[in-house]
Image (cartoon, grey):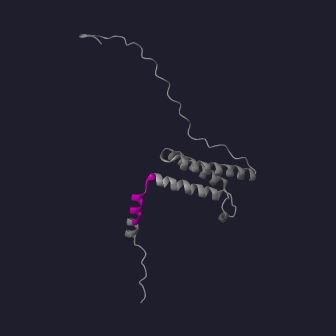
Amino acid sequence: MAEPEAQPPDEAELQRLLAAELARMSVRDVLVDCANSLSMLTASRLGLDRETGGAVDLAEARLGIDALRGVGSMLAPLTEPAELEGLRRALASLQMAYAQAAREAGGVPPGPPEGPPRREPPPPAPPAAERASIWTPRGEV
């Protein structure tokens, strides 16, 4: 007797499965997955994986490095130091590979991107001067 073929899940079932998966995840988990994906993608854009055949895309690699740095800064307060150290080592390795790839391409790797201008803290408020008293019909204030 032949077994019935399994039917692919319908749209409602896919939505239910996705909702169940999202309920189990935290934003931190998504950021860790994002950091891992960015690291692998950036390594690929630097020609460090065999499947790309050594093709290098410096613009994409730079974007990946910058994005990985941003995700790392968001993960810093949420992650154990040992796990964060692994991310920092991966980032440093990618930055070194980027510099080497840029040199081999005949260019000098540009410096770090300029982010938004740093905000200077506001100057301290001047010391409060003694208030002059104001005459009122009921007395001075």
Where in the figure is residue 76, as x and y percent of width and height? 51, 45
Q: Is residue 130 above or below residue 70?
A: above
Single out the residue that lies furthest toward the left: 138
Where in the figure is residue 140, as x and y percent of width and height? 29, 10
129 relative to 104 in the view: left or right: left
Where in the figure is residue 25, as x and y percent of width and height? 43, 57
Q: Which residue is found at the position 45% from the left and 17% from the top?
A: 127
Residue range of the region highlighted in magenta in the rendering: 17-27
Main SS, magenta residues: helix
Q: Does the magenta stretch include residue 20?
A: yes
Q: In this view, does 56 lie above or below 71?
A: below
Q: Which residue is found at the position 51% from the left and 56% from the top?
A: 33
Single out the residue that lies furthest toward the front: 82
Single out the residue that lies furthest toward the bottom: 1
Q: Is residue 50 magenta?
A: no
Q: Which residue is found at the position 42% from the left and 14% from the top?
A: 129
Quadrant, the N terminus = bottom left
141 relative to 57 in the view: left or right: left
Where in the figure is residue 37, as x and y percent of width and height? 56, 57
Quadrant, the C terminus = top left
Q: Which residue is found at the position 66% from the left and 56% from the top?
A: 46
100 relative to 113 in the view: left or right: right
Tell me where residue 36 sits by quadrant. Answer: bottom right
